[in-house]
Amino acid sequence: MNRLLKITIVSVLMIFLGLAALPASEPNISFNIRFFDKRVFFLDHDPILIQVTLTNNGPAPFRFKLADERAFSVDFDVRTNANRMVEAADILLRRRSRSQQVFFREVSLAAGESFSFVEDLREYANFAQSGAFVVQARFFPELYHGRTRFDTAISFATGSGISPGGALAATGRPFESNRLTLSIRQPPIIGLDGIPVALDVDTNAILVRERLPPDEVVSFLLTARQRGQWEKFFLYLDLEAMLSRDPYRRRQFLAESEEGRQRMIARFRQELQGDMIGEVISLIPIDFVIERTVFTARAGTVTALQFYRVGNFTERKRFTWHLERRDDIWMIVDYSVMNLGTE
């Protein structure tokens, strides 16, 4: 009996010691980044806002430190298409190099919870030239201590089941995010009237409105949309008139100051380009036929039959484009559309 009891005790101790020797389970944490407001970015222009999100996909709570100065919790790796690292921004170097006490708070994510915040990428990377870039972020659950940069960072163990954006061991090693593609253009040239001058993306030459007849103006706009040439698409489009087609927007536009009106026009252009307001002119026609053109000395209309791909079908729409002549230049100020069904 005593021998049986001893065997039982030894077995329990072996099981206990075996469980204690098992490695701690890794937190199932995903770390993702995305553009907070996806739009066209220019050199030395508006902020490039990136939203970073931590999500606890595991069953147990996950705790981490979050610095009040986010530069001690997150870092961004920005590289050119040639894999050259973009230098750190001066403001980032100043923040991390000065002698200071880093204040932080502890955050706990329950199972299924997410935590997000937004950072300006220009405060992390010094964009000295335009071009295409690849952006990746790292989050430091135990704060950034100045020993790790992307070019000398701790590499992830191969065969450990750890992948970018996936779970990492709770050892303070940084979480690695997905990658974003960022395109930065040269700032627009400002004309004598204070309005940005449009540039041809292909040739980088200044786009100039020509004295085209109304039907050629419409053809120019539709061809530009087919080719994704937004600068040409907007060249003969009166955005103020198009914005005023909506009564609510028109009242809001008239109530704004001159500066506020310019902001509304710029925002309306971004919405059209991003297809965020459901305007049918943002759709890409696969083909079009100019059917009829009527104009006087000051106003004209162009009727065009336009074709769009919808799944396995071709949708037909008849557009009536309204134009006005200003200083011998025909500008599109309005349109109407009739759906003709599919074929």
Image (cartoon, rainbow, N blue to C red):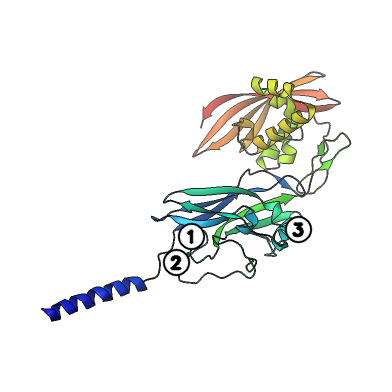
Q: Which of pointers 1 and 3 indicates the residue nearer the eye?
A: 3
Marker disc for residue 3: none
Q: Which residue is mark 2?
A: 161
The crowd level at tag 1 (other Cα within 10 Å; few <14, some 14-19, many 20+) is some
For the N terminus, the quadrant is bottom left
Residue 219 at x, y percent in the picture: 71, 33
Separation (CA) of disc 2 from disc 1: 9 Å
Q: Nearer the viewer, residue 255 or 2?
A: 2
Element carrying mark 1: loop
Q: Which residue is mark 3?
A: 90
Residue 49 at x, y percent in the picture: 65, 47
What amino acid is at disc 2? Gly
The crowd level at tag 2 (other Cα within 10 Å; few <14, some 14-19, many 20+) is few
Q: Mark 2 and mark 1 in contact? Answer it, CB < 8 Å.
A: yes
Q: Earlier in the sequence, mark 1 or mark 3?
A: 3
Q: Is residue 216 visible?
A: no
Q: Is residue 274 visible?
A: yes
What amino acid is at disc 1? Gly
Q: Mark 3 and mark 2 in contact? Answer it, CB < 8 Å.
A: no
Element carrying mark 3: helix
What amino acid is at disc 3? Asp
Q: Quadrant of residue 135?
A: bottom right
Marker disc for residue 166: 1
